[in-house]
């Protein structure tokens, strides 16, 4: 643990991450998983995650932004990187120079690509019902395909779509999948890479699809999904803190900004060096933390850098205070905050250092 002076950190379990990869891979009949490592590998630290996976012979990754791809390229010269977000035509040269794979999803991009003379690896994106990125009508898809296929400087390597409801509404999932099959049929082109699934659809349905070659896996690598079918996934992210001061309260004593908590009797509280500036937001007030396999409540307002928990005389400054990732799961915190697990791990800030278990 280098340069960790404040005893608050995230414990990232890379071994569990790789176990998740292997266990999902086993469901896939030889299809290739593209780990999605955008947003700093969903808060896990992208450089460490990618290095670890490269050491396991994984060499293809997906990010959202050109900036994210460039950060990876500085360190990793030989990996393939698919950029899933929109890249403007002014940036095509940077993409080409760095040998990134670009997503082409709109006609502004096609304007820039028609006469582009440098090599560019392209995945064409089709919108099958989510109404986010991608060419949608048959007409638009055909036109885009013609332009991409006619420019011989380009390598039209792949085609893909994205599901809006793989974790829920099966009806819309089926409509999107059928639409994707139809598009592939009428284009009648031998794409080297065809991919559609994210975590939920990979785990539930990918083995039923014959023609896809890859899946784009994000949240389930990190031990989470929005489905109940994923009990085999292992936790990869635990947020840990330690008590910096212990305080004894008398009946009637108030705690924290706004004095929102009043001791009813003699009580003991612990002050933690963790707050909303770390991404542990104020709405967590009233939730639980884990100490020595037991739950203890978060009381008082969460401050920018500190917060309060109610403890008992058995608790010491040496005990790990597990904010989430154990007895208190990331899903529980997501429920507490009325959001999804993705947001909980992504919102932990840069100033929380990470330690890695390999
Ligand atoms: C286009 C695309 N593919 C794949 C993924 C990975 O999704 P998940 O994290 O649900 O596996 C994302 C994430 O949002 C995405 O935007």
Image (tube, helix red, strand yellow):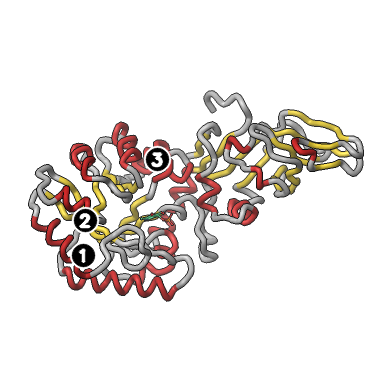
Discs 1, 2 touching: Cβ within 8 Å: yes
Residue at (37% x, 43% y) in the render: 53
For the residues labelled 3 and 2, the Cα–Cα distance comes to 38 Å
For label 3, the SS is helix
Residue at (25% x, 45% y) in the render: 88
Q: Give residue 140's mark.
A: 1
Residue 270 at what x, y percent from top left? Answer: 76, 35
- Would residue 116 be found to the left or right of residue 226 on screen? left
Residue 216 at what x, y percent from top left? Answer: 36, 56
One can see residue 70 in this view: yes
Location of the N terminus by quadrant is top right
One can see residue 213 in this view: no
For the residues labelled 3 and 1, the Cα–Cα distance comes to 40 Å
Q: Give residue 159's mark.
A: none
* Residue that numbered label 2 is attached to: 107
Residue 298 at what x, y percent from top left? Answer: 73, 44
Tell me where residue 131 sits by quadrant.
bottom left
- Would residue 96 be found to the left or right of residue 230 on screen? left
Q: Does the numbered disc 3 mark a residue whose Cβ is under 8 Å from ligand 1? A: no
Ligand 1, what quadrant? bottom left
């Amino acid at each position: 643990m280098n340069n960790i002076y404040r005893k608050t950190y995230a414990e990232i379990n890379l071994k569990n991450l790789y176990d998740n990869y292997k266990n999902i891979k086993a469901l896939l009949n030889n299809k290739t998983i593209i780990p999605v490592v955008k947003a700093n590998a969903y808060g896990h630290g992208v450089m460490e995650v990618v290095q670890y996976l490269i050491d396991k012979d994984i060499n293809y990754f997906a990010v959202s932004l050109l900036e994210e791809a460039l950060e990876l390229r500085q360190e990793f010269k030989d990996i393939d990187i698919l950029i899933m977000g929109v890249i403007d035509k002014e940036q095509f040269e940077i993409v080409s120079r760095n040998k990134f794979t670009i997503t082409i999803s709109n006609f502004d991009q096609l304007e820039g690509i028609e006469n582009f003379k440098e090599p560019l690896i392209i995945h064409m994106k089709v919108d099958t019902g989510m109404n986010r990125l991608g060419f949608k009508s048959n007409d638009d898809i055909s036109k885009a395909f013609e332009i991409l296929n006619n420019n011989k400087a380009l390598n039209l390597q792949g085609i893909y779509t994205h599901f809006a409801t793989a974790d829920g509404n099966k009806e819309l999932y089926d409509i999107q999948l059928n639409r994707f099959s139809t598009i592939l049929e009428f284009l009648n082109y031998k794409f080297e890479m065809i991919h559609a699934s994210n975590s939920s659809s990979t785990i539930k349905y990918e083995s039923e699809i014959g023609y896809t070659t890859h899946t784009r896996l994000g949240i389930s690598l990190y031990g989470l999904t929005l489905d109940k079918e994923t009990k085999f996934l292992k936790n990869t992210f635990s947020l840990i803190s330690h008590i910096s001061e212990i305080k004894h309260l008398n009946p009637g004593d108030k705690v924290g900004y706004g004095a929102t908590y009043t001791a009813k009797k003699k009580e003991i509280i612990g002050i933690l060096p963790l707050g909303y500036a770390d991404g542990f937001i104020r709405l967590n007030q009233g939730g639980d933390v884990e100490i020595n396999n037991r739950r203890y409540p978060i009381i008082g307002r969460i401050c920018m850098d500190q917060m309060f928990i109610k403890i008992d005389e058995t608790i010491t400054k040496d005990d790990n205070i597990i904010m989430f990732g154990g007895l208190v799961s990331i899903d529980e915190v997501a429920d507490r905050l009325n959001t999804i697990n993705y947001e909980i791990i992504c919102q932990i800030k840069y100033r929380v250092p990470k330690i890695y278990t390999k």
